[in-house]
């Protein structure tokens, strides 16, 4: 087996044993998003490379080394598999003038692509569900996002395993002042900088704070804090967000080192973090990005949003002992004999007409082997059809779970097999 084809490294198949967990997660998400009035947006997986360079920033980990970028050989365009969803949402909002009559609450779900070193909780194709509130000023939507995520953790059963960190990156003035101080500080400590940091010193010093290099930890911890540069407006915004959290009884810590890996953020940034998934502990992250829409060519529109990593949250639900829903048919149809085989199609359709989920045995085999399959399917009933049943247009129903009598039913009276929970 030397030439076995395999999936691309870091890109996972999601097998039928795992998809119930995914759907459970997605169902909870959809219900939550609807309960906050958010509407779904679907954008293409491929975008022009320039979109991400402009939105995320040229000197970020994502743009510098994580994007799947290639030239479309048919027309020479540079295209990129989306590494995140916010840039596409902003682009679509501008392109379709979505904000013409005011702010919009949007969400999206789907695969994202980053060329990272694959490990637990870090993949090259991974999935995010993200929320964007475009065209809203002030702290209201920041607070809404924190409240809805807090509610989500309860619904997913992981609230005891996550904690919230927040910070403020202030406005443009504060960041400009902070930038000068950072450059001076890191210049004074040139010898301690790694290659990445040296390269970013003048192009994007804030990114140095986001380093994952433990050797730089101490230096970065002692760096000038953006929080100390905030003006009154920024402090008021941050204060209101903190007040909103306190009013809602949501615990948080202020982490002055929290800067996020994308350049578009200002004011509020936040991360929900767990200690239960090793190094890949951030399960959800976001913040405000007031300048992005204008920067991409739209009318100025303040905005904020967040994205969560689906794989990491599913792992956390498993960690919390949340059981995936069982997926079993109501009825497994066993059929032996030629007339029975033909009648079985009709019987299975009649069972489905009655609202039941039905697996019709395929591929023949003895009664005994078919009953084994019926049992393994986890169905509540086996519908047994022999030539006798076929002649009478009836089925023999055998309960497979718990006790209960075997009985015969005509196709016209199958409703009694419905589970009461489905009513
Ligand atoms: P990290 O610091 O872990 O690299 P990030 O800051 O790059 O995360 P964001 O771009 O903010 O992450 O994406 C939001 C969320 O998406 C993350 O908090 C994480 O849960 C998830 N995520 C990001 N990159 C990956 C990946 N390569 N594989 C799986 N999940 C990911
Ligand atoms: Mg990253």
Image (tube, rainbow, N blue to C red):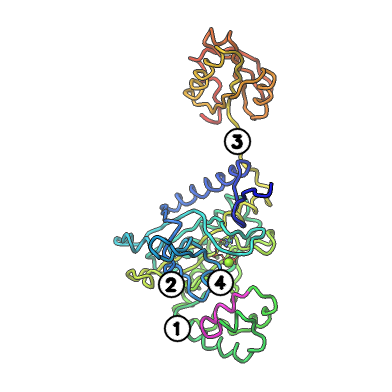
Mark 4 residue crowding within 10 angstroms, few (<14) / some (14–19) / many (20+): some
53 over 14 or under it: above or below: below
Find out whether residue 202 is within the magenta segment. yes
Q: Is disc 2 placed on a helix, strand or loop?
A: helix
Q: Which mark is residue 61?
A: 4
Task: For marks 1 and 4, give the CA distance.
Answer: 24 Å
The residue carrying mark 4 has its beta carbon less than 8 Å from ligand 2: yes
Percent x, y for residue 169? 51, 76
Q: Which label lies toward us, 2 or 3?
A: 2
Q: In this figure, which residue is indicated by the disc labeled 2?
A: 54
The answer to whether mark 3 and mark 1 are in CB contact below 8 A is no
How much space separates mark 2 and mark 3, taking CA atoms? Answer: 45 Å
**Element on which disc 3 rests:** loop
- Residue 122 drawn at (x, y percent): 62, 60
Tell me what residue is drawn at x 55 percent, y 63 percent: 114
| Element under disc 4 | helix
Mark before the other along the chain sequence, 1 or 4? 4
Ligand 1 is within 8 Å of the C-beta of the residue at disc 3? no
For residue 275, which numbered disc appears in the image?
none
- Few, some or many C-alpha atoms within 10 Å of disc 1 (few <14, some 14-19, many ≥20)? few
Q: CA distance from mark 3 to mark 1?
A: 55 Å
Q: Is residue 361 above or below residue 106?
A: above
Q: Taking 51 as reference, is 232 above or below it? A: below
Q: Which residue is mark 3?
A: 327
Please indicate whether residue 283 sits to the left or right of residue 291 in the image: right
Which circle's residue, 2 or 1, is located before the other in the chain? 2
Q: Which mark is residue 173?
A: 1
Secondary structure beneath label 1? helix
Q: Which residues are magenta?
A: 200-211
- Residue placed furthest toward the front: 2
User: Is the residue marked 1 within 8 Å of ligand 1, measured from its CB?
Assistant: no
């Amino acid at each position: 087996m030397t030439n076995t084809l395999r999936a691309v490294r870091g890109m996972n198949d999601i097998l039928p044993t795992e998809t119930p967990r995914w759907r459970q997660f997605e169902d909870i998400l959809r219900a939550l998003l609807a309960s906050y009035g958010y509407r779904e947006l679907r954008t293409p997986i491929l975008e022009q490379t320039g979109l991400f360079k402009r939105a995320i920033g040229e000197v970020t980990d994502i743009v510098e080394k994580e994007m799947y970028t290639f030239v479309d050989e048919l027309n020479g365009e540079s295209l990129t598999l989306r590494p995140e969803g916010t840039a596409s949402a902003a682009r679509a909002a501008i392109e379709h003038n979505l904000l013409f009559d005011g702010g919009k609450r949007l969400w999206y779900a789907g695969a994202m692509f980053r060329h990272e070193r694959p490990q637990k909780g870090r993949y090259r194709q991974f999935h995010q569900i993200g929320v964007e509130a475009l065209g809203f000023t002030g702290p209201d939507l920041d607070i809404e996002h924190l409240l809805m995520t807090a509610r989500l953790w309860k619904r997913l059963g992981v609230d005891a395993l996550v904690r919230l960190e927040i910070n403020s990156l202030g406005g443009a003035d504060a960041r400009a002042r902070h930038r000068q101080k950072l450059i001076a500080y890191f210049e004074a400590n040139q010898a301690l900088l790694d290659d990445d940091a040296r390269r970013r010193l003048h192009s994007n010093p804030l990114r140095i704070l986001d380093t994952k290099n433990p050797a730089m930890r101490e230096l970065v911890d002692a760096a000038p804090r953006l929080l100390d540069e905030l003006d009154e407006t920024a402090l008021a915004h941050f204060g209101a967000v903190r007040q909103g959290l306190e009013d809602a009884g949501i615990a948080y810590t202020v982490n002055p080192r929290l800067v996020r890996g994308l350049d578009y953020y200002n004011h509020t940034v936040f991360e929900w973090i767990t200690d239960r998934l090793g190094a890949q502990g951030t399960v959800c992250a976001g913040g405000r990005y007031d300048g992005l829409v204008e920067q991409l060519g739209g009318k100025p529109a303040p905005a904020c949003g967040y994205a969560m990593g689906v794989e990491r949250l599913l792992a956390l639900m498993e960690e919390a002992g949340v059981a995936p829903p069982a997926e079993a048919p109501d009825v497994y149809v066993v059929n032996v004999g030629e007339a029975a085989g033909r009648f079985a199609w009709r019987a299975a359709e009649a069972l489905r007409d009655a609202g039941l989920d039905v697996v019709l045995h395929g591929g023949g085999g003895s009664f005994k082997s078919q009953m084994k399959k019926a049992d393994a399917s986890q169905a509540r009933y086996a519908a047994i059809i022999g030539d006798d049943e076929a002649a009478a247009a009836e089925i023999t129903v055998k309960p497979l779970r718990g006790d209960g009598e075997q009985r015969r039913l005509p196709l016209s009276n199958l409703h009694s097999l419905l589970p009461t929970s489905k009513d």
